[in-house]
Image (spheres, rainbow, N blue to C red):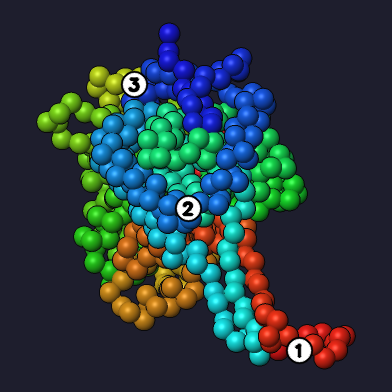
Amino acid sequence: MSQFVQNFINGVAVESQSQRITSVFNPATGEETKKVKLSTATEVDSAIAAADAAFKSWSQQSPLRRARILFKFKELLEANFDELARLISSEHGKVYSDAIGELTRGLEVVEFATGIPHLQKGEFSANAGRGIDIHSIQQPLGVVAGITPFNFPAMVPMWMFPVALACGNTFVLKPSEKDPSVSIRLAELLKDAGLPDGVFNVVQGDKEAVDILLTDPRIQAVSFVGSTPIAHYIYEKGSANGKRVQALGGAKNHALIMPDADVQGTVNALLGAAFGAAGERCMALSVAVIVGDELADKIVEELTPRVKALKIGAGLLPEGETENDMGPVISKEHKAKIESYIDQGVEQGAKLCVDGRGYKVAGHENGYFVGGTLFDNVTPEMTIWKDEIFGPVLSVVRVKDYAEGMVIINSHQYGNGSAIFTADGDSARQFTQDVQAGMVGVNIPIPVPMAFHCFGGWKASIFGPLNVYGQDGVRFYTRMKTITTRWPDSVVRSQAAFNFPTL
Ligand code: NAD
């Protein structure tokens, strides 16, 4: 019988008593490897209660002490990278080096959060008025929740909890039920690093658990990352219940390729950014908008054999074998969905240059593989342009000039990331001004900001005003309090004043 993935509540890994059970699969083989019990309302309640009880003491620890626990956690993460990467790959399917990359980007947020004594120290104005000083403090909110997607089962939780905990909050994480195991290892490592029981809790579950997190009055804030319809739901429901919400949604990232772009460099960048992680990245580049038919012909000609030659297979291989370029997609259903998008692209008149449907990997016949797919002559009327496919499908849109390309890019519902490939500084500068996206690359295909900046898109890629991690993370997980002080010697005792006070 498959092993059950546990919850982690009040410092202890515990098995849920739920009768609602789902399966975790190895996407490379199609085999069920574990089961997940979708937590009951009572179990979610006990996680919130543990976090609530732990808040008083944790929030009163000095930021330096909280930072030291995170330092220790960072060391433990590094020491366990190999085990964690294998766990991610076995449930998500991504190749080992990509799982190491995900862990590294998560670790960088932990490193950022260890600077909390500096980040949270507030502001001070001496002598703002005669004998009057003003200072501000950023206090933690209380219990906060994180709801995370399947595609980065370690990194996205680590976009959230290191900053939240560093600020003095306690946390309840509801990871994706598709690849939930790594969240429990992270909870165990936090405990090993010295985190007090109850400060970080994990509940496995689905909509039922999420709805409790969105409505329970003890939860002060909710961070969500996932698809746009669910992000919108989380934002509306969480806000309606008085919570602070940041909800990051889906994406369709465009690259604008100018006639002076370096062809080889651009082709290499497109390959990695469109097909890495089988296109299951919210910052994947899935649309190449190419200026001029001559350049488009050249790029499509270069791309076609290289997309056909992508090395596709299991994310984890026996020692000594060369790693694959990309692994399987997450599930049988998702594979079918991606293939149906490819069907629609063909039906709606796009030119299919490389067809990834029906892709088989020898020895992994039941794995959820989709081959690299390349479409040319895609237009904004087509479903494959409008929708997020979240698979290894790259669409080429041909335009006559910069202006036409910009109109197409900015008319898309999503605005997560975007990039320009050019050798011309003026075009690049204009692009960074004009493009309606939250994260922009100049000759950089996946411009995911480092941990000391902030991550977030525009338009339907985000709901709520604050991005994740960086200074926005600190703002999101704290409440500002501004204190105006004077002491008796400077108090003017003359008479009561009834006008609005000015300094
Ligand atoms: P998803 O929206 O299906 O699930 C995300 C989380 O929401 C999971 O924990 C899931 O259990 C929960 N959930 C699912 N249905 C729900 C419902 N009806 N009510 C309440 N909760 C529900 O997303 P996914 O398939 O796991 O992840 C892929 C999506 O995430 C893509 O759209 C991708 O672009 C997006 N994503 C965005 C970013 C970003 O930074 N903008 C980063 C990573 C992934």
Q: Earlier in the sequence, mark 1 or mark 2?
A: 2
Q: Is the C-beta separation of discs 3 and 1 under 8 Å?
A: no
Q: Amino acid at mark 3?
A: Thr
The residue that appears at 78% across and 85% down in the rendered structure is 501
Q: In the rendering, which numbered label is found on residue 492?
A: 1
Can you give x and y, in whole percent of width and height, for residue 105 in the image?
A: 35, 50
**Going 53% across and 69% down the picture, which residue do you hit?**
122
Q: Is residue 397 left or right of residue 250?
A: left
| Tag 2 residue | 166
Mark 1 residue crowding within 10 angstroms, few (<14) / some (14–19) / many (20+): few
Secondary element type, mark 3: loop
Between residues 278 and 158, which one lies in front from this camera angle? Answer: 158
Q: Quadrant of the C terminus?
A: bottom right
Q: Secondary structure at mark 1?
A: loop
Mark 3, residue position: 29
**In this image, 394 relative to 303: left or right?**
right
Q: Earlier in the sequence, mark 3 or mark 2?
A: 3
| Ligand 1: quadrant of the figure | top right
Q: Secondary structure at mark 2?
A: helix
- Residue 41 in which image quadrant: top right
Nearer the camera: disc 1 or disc 2: 1
